[in-house]
């Protein structure tokens, strides 16, 4: 199943220490230039999604924001807490996660 591969890639980011979770922490990672990819769940708040997308556009090509085909509860299985927004802070792991997204994150 494709979502299993995506969850595996996110779990790898977590184990590598290259995952930031929660809106405030992700916002800090984006604005400081540490985030290479921001992911948000299907059930993330619309306001948070708009703010994250805006911040990623403001920093330019350094960071993309993509929706996940997952819910907060799906992520809770590997992150041990329900979060709607996360950021990958390693460039290579961001590429890996992007390839696991439906349509390559587009």
Image (cartoon, rainbow, N blue to C red):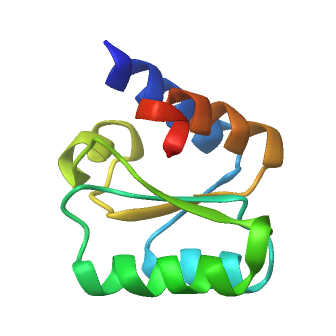
Name of the residue lying farthest toward the top: 1
- The residue sitting at 72% across, 59% down in the picture is 36
The answer to whether residue 96 shows anywhere in this view is yes
Q: From the viewer's perspective, is 79 left or right of 35?
A: left
Residue closest to the eye, 29 or 78: 29
User: Which quadrant, please, contains the N terminus?
Assistant: top left
Image coordinates for residue 101, horizontal then vertical, percent: 47, 35
| Above or below, 81 relative to 44 | above
Picture quadrant where residue 95 is located: top right
Residue 64 position in % (x across, y down): 62, 62
Q: Residue at x 44, y 78 (%)?
A: 23
**Image coords of residue 18 (percent x, y):** 70, 50
Percent x, y for residue 79? 40, 46
- Please indicate whether residue 97 sits to the left or right of residue 71 in the image: right
Q: How many marks?
A: 0
- The residue nearer to you, when weighing 101 against 45, is 101
Query: Is residue 101 in view from this perspective?
Result: no
Does 91 sit above or below residue 47?
above
Q: Residue at x 34, y 47 (%)?
A: 80
- Nearer to the camera, 56 or 11: 56
Q: Please tell me which residue is depicted at 77% across the width and 67% down the height of the picture.
A: 61
Side of 49 where 97 appears, left or right: right
């Amino acid at each position: 199943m494709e979502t299993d591969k995506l969850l595996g890639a996110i779990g790898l980011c977590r184990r590598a220490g290259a995952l930031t979770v929660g809106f405030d922490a992700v916002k800090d990672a984006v604005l400081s230039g540490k985030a290479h990819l921001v992911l948000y769940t299907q059930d993330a708040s619309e306001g948070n999604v708009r703010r994250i997308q805006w911040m990623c556009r403001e920093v330019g090509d350094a960071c993309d924001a993509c929706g996940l085909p997952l819910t907060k509860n799906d992520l809770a299985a590997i992150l041990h807490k329900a979060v709607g927004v996360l950021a990958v802070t390693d460039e290579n792991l961001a590429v890996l996660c992007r390839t696991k997204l439906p349509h390559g994150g587009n």
